[in-house]
Image: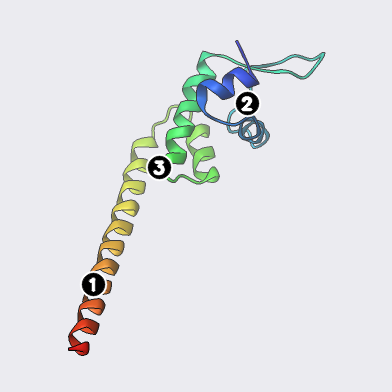
Amino acid sequence: MYRISEFSQITGLSKETLRYYAEVKLLEPAYIEPSNNYRYYDDGSYFLAMLLVKLRRFGFTIQEMIAVMEDESFEHLEDLLQQKRKKIQMQIDDLLQQTEEIDEFLASGKEQKR
C-alpha cells in the first residue's frame, strides 16, 4: 500500500489531483485509515492511475474519463480512443490548413511590396 504522497510521486499525479479524482469517484483510494483519514493506494490503483494519466494526455475530459472508468470491462475504450484519434487528426488538418493560409497571405504581402 502507498500513502498519497508516495502514490503521487510514482504516478506523477499531484496530491490535489488524487483528492479531486477521489471526490468525483474517478480514482478512489483502496483504503482510508479511519483514525486519521490517511489515503492508501494499491497496485490496482496504480494501473488505473496510469490509465488516467494517458487519457488526460490524449485530451479526455473528466466526464469522458469517468465514463471509461464506469465501464469496468473497458469494452468501449478502443472505440473512444478511435473517436479521440479522429478528432485530433481533424484538428491537425485544420491547423495545417491555417498554416498554409498564413503562408499564402504572407507571400501575397511580399509580392505587393515589390
Query: Considering only vertical position in the picture, is 42 above or below 92?
Result: above
Q: Residue at x 30, y 51 (%)?
A: 86
Q: Nearer the viewer, residue 24 or 9?
A: 9
Going from N to C along the chain, the mark reached first, 2 or 3, is 2
Residue of label 1: 103
Quick check: marks 2 and 3 in contact, CB under 8 Å? no
Inter-mark Cα distance, 1 to 2: 49 Å
Q: Nearer the viewer, mark 1 or mark 2?
A: 1
Going from N to C along the chain, the mark reached first, 3 or 1, is 3
Q: Is residue 97 left or right of residue 41?
A: left
Q: Nearer the viewer, mark 3 or mark 1?
A: 1
Q: Residue at x 67, y 31 (%)?
A: 19
The quarter of the picture where the N terminus appears is top right
Residue of label 2: 28
The amino acid type found where label 2 is placed reads Glu
Residue of label 3: 58
Inter-mark Cα distance, 3 to 1: 29 Å
Residue that lies at the very extreme toward the right in this rendered image = 35
The quarter of the picture where the C terminus appears is bottom left
